Image (cartoon, grey):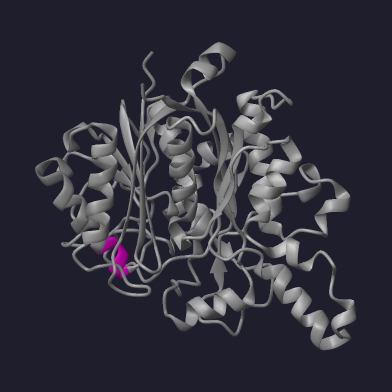
Amino acid sequence: MTRRVVVTGLGMATPLGTGVEKNWEAACAGKSGIGPITKFDSSSFSARIAGEVSDFRSEDFVDKQQIRRFDIFIHYAVASARMAMEDSGLKITPSNAHRVGSITGSGLGGLAMLLHNHKVLLEKGPRRISPFFIPGIIANMAPGQIAIEFGAKGPNISIETACAASCHAVGEAFRMIREGISDAIIAGGAEAVVNPLSLGGFCSMRALSTRNDEPEKASRPFDLDRDGFVMGEGAGMLILEELDQALERGTNIYAEVVGYGLSGDAYHVSAPDPEGEGAINCMKMAIDYAGLRPDQIDYINAHGTSTKLNDLSENKAIKAVFGEHAYKLAISSTKSMTGHLLGGAGGVEAIFAALTIKRGIIPPTINYETLDPECDLDYVPNVARQAKVETAMSNSFGFGGTNACLILKAFEA
C-alpha cells in the first residue's frame, strides 16, 4: 500500500520577513521585499538591487559559538528548520531518530564565507584561514547542521540543482517517505549569495533587472517590460510526514503532497528550451505521479523569474500541458515580491502553495502592468484573490536545464 505524505510544519526567512506569518501577510498584501543593496557598495554594478532578509538575527536561532563557524545560508536553513519543527510539534527521540531525515537544496553554498577567507589568504596568509572555513561553506552542511541540531539520523542529503534544488529536495523527501525509507523529513532549501562576486557574475550574463531606480517594481514576471530577475536570499523549510504518524500526533496538516516530477532540457547551459519541452515533461510526470488529470489542477506557483526567455518558455509549457484549461488556471509568481532565491526558491514557493490551499487565498503577481501578447494567461495580477484551491502545482527550473515540479492537494482523510 502506498503511504501518504502530508505537510505538518513550515518555516521561512525571505526578503518579505522572518517567519511564515510575516511572509504570508506581505505576499497577500502584494508587498515587495526588493530594495537597494545594503550589504556592500554596489555602485559600480549594472544591477544595484536585491531582496535582502533585513530583519533576520542569527543569534535568535543559532548558538553564539556557532554563528561565526557557518555561512549565513546555513543560519537561514537552521532558523527555518527550527520554525518548521516548532510549528509541527514533531519530537525526535532515540526511538525514532533513524526514521527522520534532513534534505535541503542550495545552488551555490557559502560564497560569502568563501570570499572572506580568500581575502584572509591574500592579506594575511594561509595560517590565518579559519579551521571552520571548509565545513562552513559546503552545501551539505545545511542538512548536516539541521540533523545535528535536532538529532535526525535518517537520510541526510544536499541537492545542488541550481534554481530547482529545493524543489527537488522536497520532492525527494516526499518520495522517500512514500516508499517507506523515512517517516518524516525536514526538507527545503536555503541560499545567501547577495555579494559582489555572484552579483557580478549574473550582471555579466545580463540576467538581472537594472531597474535600479524602482527596486520594488523590478521583478515583474510575465509583464511585457520585464528585463531580468532580481537576486533574493533566505530559506524555506517544510516538515513532511507519513500521514498515519501525523494523525496519531494530532498535528495540523497544511496539505498533502501527491505529485513530483523531474526532467532535463538537454538544451543549453542557462537558457531554457524555447518550446518548454523539459518543463512540459516535468509537469506531465508530476500530474501522472499524482494520478490526476491536468484539468484537476487549480493553481500554479510558477517559476516566473521575470526574464524574457524563462517566462515565455514556461508559458508555452503550461499551454502545452493544460490545453484550454490553461486559460482557467490561476497562475502567480511570488518571485515578483521575494525576488529569486535561486536554490532556496522551491522551498519557499512550496510553502506558498501549501498556504494557498490551506487558507484559500492566492498570492498575486505584482508589477504586472503591460500585457505581453505571448504571455496571455491569468497571472493573478497585482491583487491577491480569494479562491478555493484544491490542488496546486509549484514549478522550479534551473541552469543546465534541470526541472522540478511538485503537486500539493487539500488534505482529505
Q: Quadrant of residue 275?
A: bottom left
Q: Residue at coordinates 31% horizontally, 43% vertically from top-left?
A: 300
Q: Please, which residue is most extreme toward the left here?
A: 324
Screen quadrant of the C terminus? top left
Q: Residue at coordinates 36% horizontally, 21% vertically from top-left?
A: 1
Q: Residue at coordinates 48% horizontally, 66% vertically from top-left?
A: 214
Residue 126: x and y in percent read 85, 82
Camera sees residue 28: no
> In front: 344, or 269?
269
Camera sees residue 314: yes
Q: Is 249 situated above or below 405?
A: above
Q: Quadrant of residue 279?
A: bottom left
Q: Is 329 situated above or below 112?
A: above
Residue 256: x and y in percent read 41, 27
Residue 76: x and y in percent read 66, 50
Q: Is residue 186 left or right of residue 210?
A: right
Q: Is residue 39 left or right of residue 327?
A: right
Q: Which residues are magenta?
A: 308-312
Residue 407: x and y in percent read 34, 37
> In front: 43, or 269?
269
Residue 373 falls within the magenta-colored stretch: no
Q: Residue at coordinates 70% horizontally, 23% vertically from top-left?
A: 95
Q: Secondary structure of the magenta portion, mostly?
A: helix
